[in-house]
Amino acid sequence: MESLEDKNSGVVPFNSKLETGIRALVVLEAFYPRHCDLLEMTWFDHLVVHTGDLAGQDVPESLHPDLPNRTGELFVRRQLVEQSLRMMHEMHLIEVLETENGIEFCAGEAAPSYLDLLQTPYSLALKQRAKWMAERFSAFTAEDIRSLVEMQIGRWTAEFRAIKALTGQSS
């Protein structure tokens, strides 16, 4: 999925590292003190704006429109999420932890103060959905979340793996 660029200012507002980083920060703050790895953050980045992809009662409406071919979106998202997490870490908003499970991320000490400044209707809706996700997934292990994602959006996961195999990328 390509970012939209304002030709006059050079600003990339949609799915930029900044927008993705803010989404990551919102998710990590909602999940605090839980640590999440890159794969979980990639899934959460998708799900926080596409909550409607999760079947069940009391599921908030998706913030972003449902596009017919989201496989490409998931494929591009992992690298973008990684870059955005790195950027937010450089801004001292996210902590990067080396654990026995690998590299994990959590909200930094300054995250709540920064996020309190975000008061647009979109930001408030994003925070509400992240809180809903955290309440829903807080007791889930990474494997539980993987199973849920594969069950709920399994065809995308299968297509995502097929694309990765065709391009020679590893997990």
Image: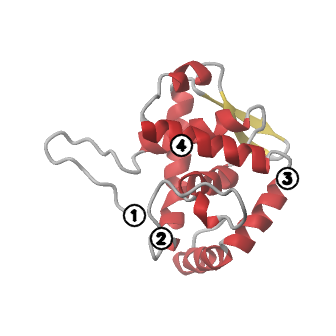
Q: Quadrant of the C terminus?
A: bottom right
Mark 1 and mark 4 residues within 8 Å of each other at the beta carbon: no
Q: Earlier in the sequence, mark 4 or mark 3?
A: 4
Disc 1 versus disc 4: distance between alpha carbons? 20 Å
Which residue lies at the image location 44% right of the left edge and 38% below the top edge?
121
Dot 4 falls on a residue whose secondary structure is: helix
Residue type, mark 1 in image: Met
Q: Earlier in the sequence, mark 1 or mark 4?
A: 1
Check disc 3 and report the residue beneath it.
141
Check disc 4 and report the residue beneath it.
126
Q: How is the image coloured?
A: secondary structure
Mark 2 and mark 1 residues within 8 Å of each other at the beta carbon: yes
Residue 101: % across, % down: 82, 47
Q: Is residue 67 left or right of residue 102?
A: left
Nearer to the camera, 120 or 101: 120
Relative to 3, say whether 168 is above or below: below
Taking the view exactly as shown, the residue that stands out farthest to the left is 8
Q: Of circles 4 and 3, which is in front?
A: 4
| CA neighbours of label 1 inside 10 A, class few (<14), some (14 to 19), many (20+) | few
Dot 2 falls on a residue whose secondary structure is: helix
Q: Earlier in the sequence, mark 2 or mark 4?
A: 2
Disc 2 versus disc 4: distance between alpha carbons? 22 Å
Q: Is residue 129 left or right of residue 140?
A: left
Q: Earlier in the sequence, mark 3 or mark 1?
A: 1
- Disc marking residue 1: 1
